[in-house]
Image (spheres, grey):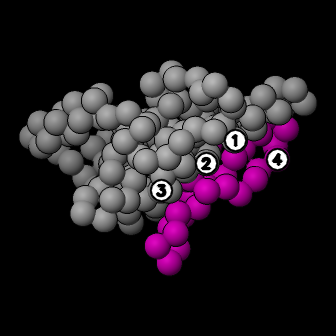
Amino acid sequence: MNELDVVGVRVEMPSNQPIVLLREVGGDRYLPIWIGPGEATAIAFAQQGMAPARPLTHDLFKDVLEAVGQELTEVRITDLRDNVFYAELVFASGVEVSARPSDAIALALRTGTPIYGSETLLDEAGISIPDEQEDEVEKFREFLDQISPEDFGTSNQ
């Protein structure tokens, strides 16, 4: 398993489909995952440190974990089958729960939990961006700095 950082979310044009972009720590591979607008908003809120007036589902899940004394120790993005990504939530108790990567990422950002991607998945779906193309990645990061959750066309009720 390789540790991944969340670069951010953006809307892919012309399909208007949100994606979350993950980057391999200490490597040159990026993992784009297409996600729903609600999850894109939840990830963007967490990255920007925004707290909605009422808790989103991922905030609620974090609060429930704290209330019952469970610790999320890692999130693993494990597989891609038939164009569907799979993830697992791993708890300190040893329990593992299957999850959508978008939900797992949103929860990991709220709990400060590390995110990992399997080597096989990164080989299959990762995009290698050598250092000389880092300017394009920097432009993407600048774009992410200017985007807000409202750009995803969802409300936070």
Distance, label 4 to label 1, CA atoms, is 21 Å
> In what element is the residue under mark 3?
loop
Distance, label 3 to label 2, CA atoms, is 9 Å
Mark 2 vs mark 4: which is more N-terminal?
4
**Which is more foreground, mark 1 or mark 3?**
1
Q: In this view, does 143 lie to the left or right of 117?
A: left
Using the image as rendered, state which of residue 134 and residue 123 is in the foreground.
134
Q: Residue at x 54, y 49 (%)?
A: 38
Which residue range is magenta in the image?
A: 75-101
**Which residue is the site of mark 2?**
103
For the residue carrying disc 3, how many other residues have a C-alpha within 10 Å: few (<14), some (14-19), or many (20+)?
some
**Which residue is the site of mark 4?**
95
Q: In which quarter of the image is residue 143?
A: top left
**Which residue is the site of mark 3?**
35
> In what element is the residue under mark 2?
helix
Using the image as rendered, state which of residue 61 and residue 29 is in the foreground.
61
Mark 4 vs mark 1: which is more N-terminal?
1
Amino acid carrying mark 2 in the image? Asp
Give the number of the disc on residue 57: 1
Q: Are discs 3 and 2 less than 8 Å apart at CB? A: no
**Residue 112 in sight here:** no
Magenta region, main secondary structure: strand
Mark 3 vs mark 2: which is more N-terminal?
3
Distance, label 2 to label 4, CA atoms, is 17 Å
Q: Where is residue 122 in the image (x, y as percent from the top left)?
A: 41, 56
For the residue carrying disc 2, how many other residues have a C-alpha within 10 Å: few (<14), some (14-19), or many (20+)?
many
Mark 3 vs mark 4: which is more N-terminal?
3
> In what element is the residue under mark 4?
loop
**Which is more foreground, mark 1 or mark 2?**
1
> In what element is the residue under mark 1?
helix
Question: Compared to 24, does 83 lie above or below?
Answer: below
